Image: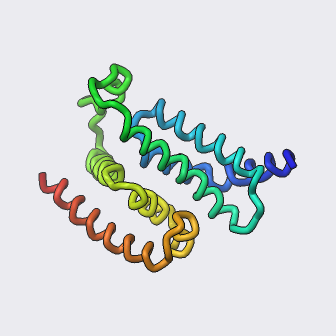
Amino acid sequence: MRDDQDTLYREAAAAYGAALQRLARAVEINPERRRDLLQDMHVALWRSFAAFDRRCALRTWVYRVTHNVAATYVDRERRAPRGQVALDDIAHLPDAQDVGADLEKSDALTRLITLLRALKMPDRQIMALYLEGLDAAAIADVTGLSSGAVATRISRLKTHLARSFQETADV
C-alpha cells in the first residue's frame, strides 16, 4: 500500500508540480510562506493517496486536494490578525532598481495576480483551474459545483477581471 502511495505521489508531483507552484503563487505573494504552502500541498497530496480509490482521475484528485489546502490557507490568512508589516515582508516588496525592460509585462502579471488574489473562494479556485487549462467539467469535479455553474462563473469572472484589469491600467 505504501509503495503504491509513493508511486502515485511521484507520478502526480512530476505531472502537476508546475501547476501546484502556480497555484501557490496565486495564493501567496511572500516567497517563504509560498514555499511553506507548497510544501503543505505536497504533504497533503502524499497523505491523500492512502485513501485514493481511483474513482476519479488522478488530475481531479490532485487538484481537489491541493485546492482544498489552498482554500484552508486563504481562510486561515483571512482570519489572522492584521497589523504591522513584518521586516521579512518588506524585503519582498519591489525595489525601484528592479525596474527593467519587461516592466509592462511584469506590471500586467502583477496586476492580474493581485486581481486573482482579491477574488473570494471558490471564484479564485475556479479561475486558477481555468488558467491551468481545465474545462468546466473538470473544474466541476474539483470544486463540487455543477458544470453549468462553473461555466457561468468563468464567463462572469472573465468579464469582471477584464474590466478590473483595464481600470487598474488606467490608474
Give the left or right position of residue 8, taking residue 69 as reference: right
Q: Is residue 105 visible?
A: no
Is residue 166 in view? Answer: yes
The residue furthest bottom is 148
The answer to whether 48 is drawn above or below residue 155 in the figure is above
Residue shown at 69%/67% (left/top)? Answer: 57
| Residue 74 picture quarter | top left
Q: Is residue 31 left or right of residue 106?
A: right
29 w.r.t. 70: above or below: above
- Total count of labels: 0
Name the one closer to the observer, 168 or 81.
81
Q: Say left or right for 115 vs 28.
A: left
**Frontmost residue, 4 versus 73:** 73
Q: Is 25 above or below relative to 55?
A: above
Q: Residue at x 47, y 33 (%)?
A: 33
Q: Residue furthest left?
A: 171
Q: Position of residue 30 (x, y in %)?
A: 41, 34
Residue at horizontal 38%, vertical 76%? 152
Identify the residue at horizontal 85%, vertical 45% (top origin). Answer: 2
Residue 54: % across, % down = 76, 64
Quadrant location of residue 64?
bottom right
Would residue 83 be found to the left or right of residue 30 on screen?
A: left
Q: Nearer the viewer, residue 78 or 11?
A: 78
